[in-house]
Image (cartoon, rainbow, N blue to C red):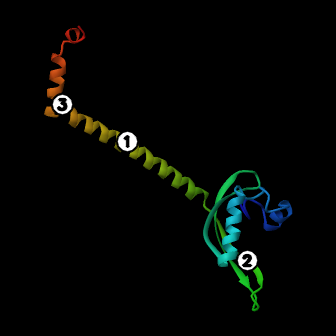
Amino acid sequence: MGGCHGYDSPEAMIAQVSNIEEKQIYVDLENREEFKHRLREFDEVQDWEYQVYRQDGSIIWIEEDTRTIFDSQGNILYYEGIIQDITERKHREADLQRQLEELRIEIDHQKREHEVKMITQSDYFQELQSEINEVDLDELWN
């Protein structure tokens, strides 16, 4: 894998992407708009995570740090930044989140089993159970 978002080189990316605003790169254009808004407002954006399309159409997660570079009159010269592929990290986070949820479900299940056991073993429950067993339903309905 090399290059920018799955392209062989920056030149290949520029040649093949006709309009960055279209869904040729960004999976979520609203996310892109929010990124641009924050960059305009704060002149830098750090740790911005989002999904992009690779050249082959697959989707990856990236993290971007970008800042605006100005000339001495305050005009924008260019943007400078670093983009990292964080797809593997996002997959690990999702796996850990899923495992955590499964563990929560198991703990909740065990907790409910324990609570039911405590209730059914209580003297009060045993007395109620005994009284219910002594009730003659035929007599009750007649």
In the image, residue 78 lies at what x, y percent?
76, 79
Residue 49 found in image quarter: bottom right
Nearest to the eye among marks 3 and 1: give it. Answer: 3
Label 3 or label 2, whichever lies nearer to me, is 3
In the figure, residue 128 lies in which quadrant? top left
Give the numbered dot on residue 125: 3
Q: Earlier in the sequence, mark 3 or mark 1?
A: 1
Q: Nearer the viewer, residue 27 or 122?
A: 122
- Residue type (three-letter) at the residue carrying disc 3: Phe
Q: Amino acid at mark 1?
A: Glu
- Three-letter amino acid code at the position of disc 2: Tyr
Looking at the rendered structure, the secondary structure element under dot 2 is strand
Identify the residue position indicated by label 1 in the image. Answer: 106
The span from disc 3 to disc 2 (Cα, nearest Å) is 72 Å
Whether pointer 3 and pointer 2 mark residues with C-beta atoms closer than 8 Å, the reply is no
Question: What residue would you read off at disc 2?
Answer: 79
- Quarter of the figure with the C terminus: top left
Residue at x-position 75% and y-position 58%: 25
Dot placed on the residue nearer the N-terminal end, 2 or 1: 2
Residue located 35% across and 43% down the image:
108
Q: Crowding near pointer 3: few (<14 within 10 Å), some, many (20+)?
A: few
